[in-house]
Image: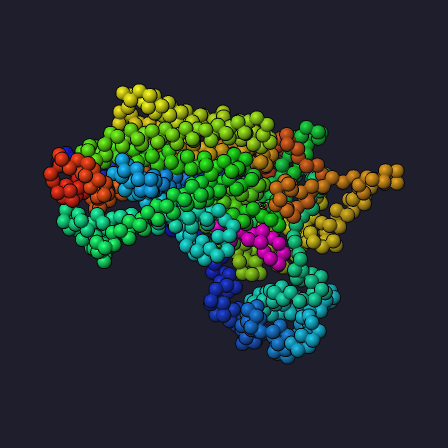
């Protein structure tokens, strides 16, 4: 009655990626393709051993180099024996040029979805597991162990159009009023006119929601610092929503508006095979995810649905630990554009840009940085330039939920 | 006895109907999801995340914890007068903890995953999550109370076996397995140590610990945050439990004519204790109000002033106040005391603590530190299903007592023996036979 039966198609369609029958499922996929099924299966098996630490990375490459060249005509992966790598003190992962990266993608495509998922998904994990991975590998776009996805949001650029809100709800097929992205229009004592606050999940490094979760469903993805909910583990106790200071969590109180059959499994399961993206099923907690399946996809890495939709260019998503990333570069640019007169006043700060993190004093270490003014203690949310309703969205979700409250009308 | 029996069946029928309705409501909720409750998300949605289910959970745990503290205190401090109600209090603990556990399950969006998701990750989550601490300590307490009860029961069952219904023979045999008289002093010592552990653990860990910590550790809900919640919750546990025991004692005395076992003295004493803990309860409320109003940070003073202007809070506090006033008056002028009045005061206090607990949960979520949302404070009216759960769980506890009283003696044999030692001159009956007749009603 309350099982995942209501989400059959997602489960079925992705079972190829998960569980014990992955081999059968994969064999079926590979059989359809033009390449050698046995090779694919064997590689995937060894890839699993590689992740489990039973097999050296270099051994894995050596074992398959010839076969892969024969089958696909190219193998971009490094060939070096484990002895050599031990001698050189780091894993033999070379920095990639764009060309190499392209070739690699080509191989990926040739190997087909299933092979790529198991083979190269495992590859990535193995690199992360090994702390001696070279600095070059760390700096590569593929796997930066210090990566922390986050955002810089320029509130002075926002005009309150709600495009990001709509884009997010469409991309993630959230139910009405589950505003993973929420834009406040507010008035404040010392600020004239309309001010905006664009609120996603703050992707806290010290996330209270994660701390209180009784199941580990709410967790931080170690490779990139995204705070996610494993929809297969969550028991729907809602403690995360209670503990989050920002009110960014939206529980799936009833059946989701969009049935599971309409959700693309590639947009549901991340590269660890955990169901963390798109809207949650009934009885499970959801919130802004910062689009993990985009971050797993080399073609769309570093983008989010809301950022893409923002025509005012107010949202900059990227690696907050990388000085070269979009958000950090943007911060640097606005700072440079607003210098202070330090020649006359040597003690002034370098720029006139106001930045803040929301409720930073709570110690949550949020990874969203705002450019613009922080709402003060007397700030008051007001009707925006366009209303949620005008844009086909729901602002106050309780209005929708109340319709199904059992005999709720009796009391109101 | 015929009339007692008919009354028994009547009550039984009502209780079963109530439980049936509650289960139907729950089934409906499982089918449609928690959307059938009056709950919603806090924040832009304009609701509250937790409500009556969590409030009722705290309430039942409070009754349960208070019950066992009462019983342990009677044993440790040798408060012989209350011996006849000690086992009622222990049974109330078991029943209360069970329905509290049930509330945790009802409250979940995915109760089917409780075991896999919680136990499977226990080694990780036990370090962080107050909810996991709660589940742990409640389980521990259940085991301790059950052990405590089982140990004291062995003594009674062996001696009263002949007067107990044969139907439950396998159960009695299980409970008294391997009994010899030589174990009596050992068991008595074990029970004493268990009582000591309970007395120490309860205030530290339970209603003064993990249960309030569920809330008191959340710094962004100013209505909850702070160290006063430990003592505050403890006073609520004790007032609720004493009220519960007074009501139970009254019911059993009336049903079985136990006037000489649960004497008027017991009621007077319990009522005074109720007054004492009600006073502590109000005193700690006062601390919070004064602290939250004088020169508190903005979020805290918003929460406090909202509390002071909300009818549910005022009614709850008023009810405790009126009960306290009555208890004070009857202490000064004993003629004002009557058992029905004591029961009325107990029902009033129990209602008030339930209201206060639900309000506490809801209000905390209505006045978060981050209050920019126009939809905050949200609103919440429990749905019929949620309200039905309170009636349903009360019915479950009543049913528990109705069944248990048919199976095991609900008054300890020690207590009866004790009473009879005092009354030997008048009483010529064999103590065990007499006791059994009184305890296992038919
Ligand atoms: S903003 Fe809230 S939900 Fe997001 S990581 Fe921080 S505490 Fe968790
Ligand atoms: S609702 Fe789910 S994710 Fe949130 S705390 Fe509970 S189990 Fe964890
Ligand atoms: S980052 Fe992704 S999930 Fe978060 S608001 Fe933007 S589109 Fe929605």
Relative side of B312 to A267, left or right: left
Q: Where B180 sits versus B248, above or below?
A: below
* Residue situated furthest right in the rendering: A343
Would you say residue A226 sits in the magenta stretch?
yes
What's the residue at 81%, 45% (across, down)? A336
Q: Looking at the picture, tell me which residue is in the foreground, A75 or B162.
A: B162
The magenta segment: A214-229
Q: Looking at the picture, tell me which residue is in the foreground, A371 or A344.
A: A344
Residue B99 drawn at (x, y percent): 35, 43
What's the residue at 28%, 53% (across, down)? B186
Q: Where A192 sits versus A248, above or below?
A: above
Quadrant assignment for the C terminus of chain A = top left
Which quadrant of the structure image shows residue B435?
top left
Relative side of A139 to A68, left or right: right
Residue A138 drawn at (x, y percent): 69, 62
Which quadrant of the structure image shows residue B411?
top left
Residue B256 visible somewhere in the drawing: no
What's the residue at 73%, 50% (across, down)? A328
Q: Looking at the picture, tell me which residue is in the foreground, A331 or A280.
A: A331
Q: Where A160 sits versus B140, above or below?
A: above
What's the residue at 65%, 42% (across, down)? A360
């Amino acid at each position: 009655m309350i099982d995942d039966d209501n989400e059959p198609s997602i489960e079925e369609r992705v079972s190829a990626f998960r569980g014990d029958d992955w081999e059968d499922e994969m064999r079926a996929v590979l059989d359809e393709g033009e390449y050698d099924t046995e090779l694919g299966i064997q590689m995937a098996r060894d890839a699993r051993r590689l992740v489990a630490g039973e097999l050296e990375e270099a051994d894995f490459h050596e074992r398959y180099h010839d076969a892969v060249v024969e089958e696909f005509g190219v193998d971009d992966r490094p060939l070096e024996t484990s002895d050599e790598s031990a001698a050189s003190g780091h894993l033999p992962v070379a920095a990639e040029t764009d060309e190499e990266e392209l070739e690699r993608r080509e191989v990926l495509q040739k190997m087909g979805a299933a092979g790529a998922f198991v083979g190269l998904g495992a590859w990535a994990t193995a690199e992360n597991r090994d702390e001696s991975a070279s600095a070059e590998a760390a700096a590569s776009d593929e796997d930066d162990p210090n990566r922390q996805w986050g955002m810089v949001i320029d509130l002075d650029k926002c005009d309150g159009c709600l495009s990001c809100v709509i884009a997010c709800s469409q991309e993630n097929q959230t139910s009405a009023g589950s505003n993973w992205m929420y834009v406040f229009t507010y008035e404040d004592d010392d600020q004239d006119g309309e001010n905006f606050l664009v609120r996603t999940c703050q992707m806290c490094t010290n996330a209270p929601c994660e701390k209180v979760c009784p199941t580990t469903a709410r967790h931080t993805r170690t490779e990139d610092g995204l705070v996610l909910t494993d929809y297969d583990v969550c028991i729907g106790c809602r403690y995360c929503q209670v503990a989050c200071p920002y009110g960014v969590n939206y529980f799936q109180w009833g059946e989701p508006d969009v049935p599971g059959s309409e959700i693309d499994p590639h947009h549901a399961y991340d590269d660890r095979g955990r169901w963390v993206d798109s809207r949650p099923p009934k009885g499970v907690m959801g919130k802004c995810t910062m689009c993990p399946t985009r971050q797993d996809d080399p073609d769309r890495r570093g983008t989010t649905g809301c950022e893409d939709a923002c025509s005012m260019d107010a949202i900059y998503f990227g690696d907050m630990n990388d000085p070269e990333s979009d958000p950090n570069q943007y911060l640097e640019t606005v700072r440079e554009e607003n210098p202070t007169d330090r020649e006359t006043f040597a003690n002034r700060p370098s720029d006139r840009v106001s930045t803040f993190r929301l409720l930073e004093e709570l110690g949550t270490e949020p990874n969203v940085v705002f450019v613009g003014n922080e709402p003060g203690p007397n700030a008051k949310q007001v009707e925006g330039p366009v209303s949620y309703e005008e844009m086909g969205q729901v602002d106050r979700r309780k209005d929708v939920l109340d319709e199904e409250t059992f005999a709720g009308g009796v009391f109101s | 006895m015929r009339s007692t029996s008919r009354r028994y069946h009547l009550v039984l029928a009502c209780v079963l109907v109530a439980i049936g309705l509650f289960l139907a409501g729950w089934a409906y909720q499982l089918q449609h999801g928690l959307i059938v409750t009056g709950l919603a998300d806090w924040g832009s949605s304009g609701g509250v995340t937790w409500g009556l289910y969590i409030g009722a959970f705290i309430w039942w745990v409070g009754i349960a914890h208070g019950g066992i503290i009462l019983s342990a205190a009677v044993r440790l401090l040798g408060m012989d007068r209350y011996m006849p109600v000690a086992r009622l209090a222990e049974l109330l603990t078991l029943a209360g903890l069970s329905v509290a556990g049930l509330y945790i399950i009802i409250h979940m969006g995915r109760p089917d995953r409780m075991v896999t998701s919680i136990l499977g990750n226990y080694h990780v989550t036990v370090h962080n999550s107050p909810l996991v601490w709660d589940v742990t300590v409640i389980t521990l307490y259940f085991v301790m109370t059950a052990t405590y009860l089982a140990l004291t029961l062995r003594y009674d069952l062996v001696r009263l076996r002949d007067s107990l219904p044969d139907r439950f023979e396998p159960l009695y045999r299980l409970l008294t397995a391997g009994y010899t008289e030589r174990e009596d002093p050992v068991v008595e010592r074990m029970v004493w140590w268990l009582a000591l552990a309970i007395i120490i653990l309860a205030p530290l860990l339970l209603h003064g610990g993990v249960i309030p910590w569920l809330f008191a550790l959340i710094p962004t809900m100013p209505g909850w945050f702070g160290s006063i919640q430990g003592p505050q919750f403890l006073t609520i546990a004790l007032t609720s439990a004493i009220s519960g025991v007074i009501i139970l004692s009254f019911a059993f005395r009336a049903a079985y004519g136990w006037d000489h076992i649960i004497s008027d003295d017991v009621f007077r004493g319990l009522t005074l204790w109720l007054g004492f803990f009600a006073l502590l309860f109000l005193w700690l409320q006062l601390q919070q109000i004064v602290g939250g109003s004088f020169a508190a940070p903005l979020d805290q003073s918003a929460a406090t002033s909202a509390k002071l202007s909300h009818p549910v809070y005022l009614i709850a506090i008023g009810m405790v106040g009126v009960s306290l006033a009555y208890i004070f008056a009857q202490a000064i002028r004993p003629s004002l005391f009557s058992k029905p009045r004591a029961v009325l005061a107990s029902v009033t206090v129990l209602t008030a603590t339930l209201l206060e607990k639900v309000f506490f949960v809801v209000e905390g979520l209505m006045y978060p530190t981050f209050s920019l949302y126009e939809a905050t404070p949200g609103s919440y009216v429990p749905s019929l299903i949620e309200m039905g759960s309170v009636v349903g769980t009360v019915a479950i506890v009543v049913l528990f007592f109705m069944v248990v009283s048919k199976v095991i003696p609900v008054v300890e044999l020690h207590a009866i023996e004790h009473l009879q030692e005092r009354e030997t001159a008048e009483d010529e009956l064999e103590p065990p036979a007499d006791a059994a007749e009184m305890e296992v009603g038919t």
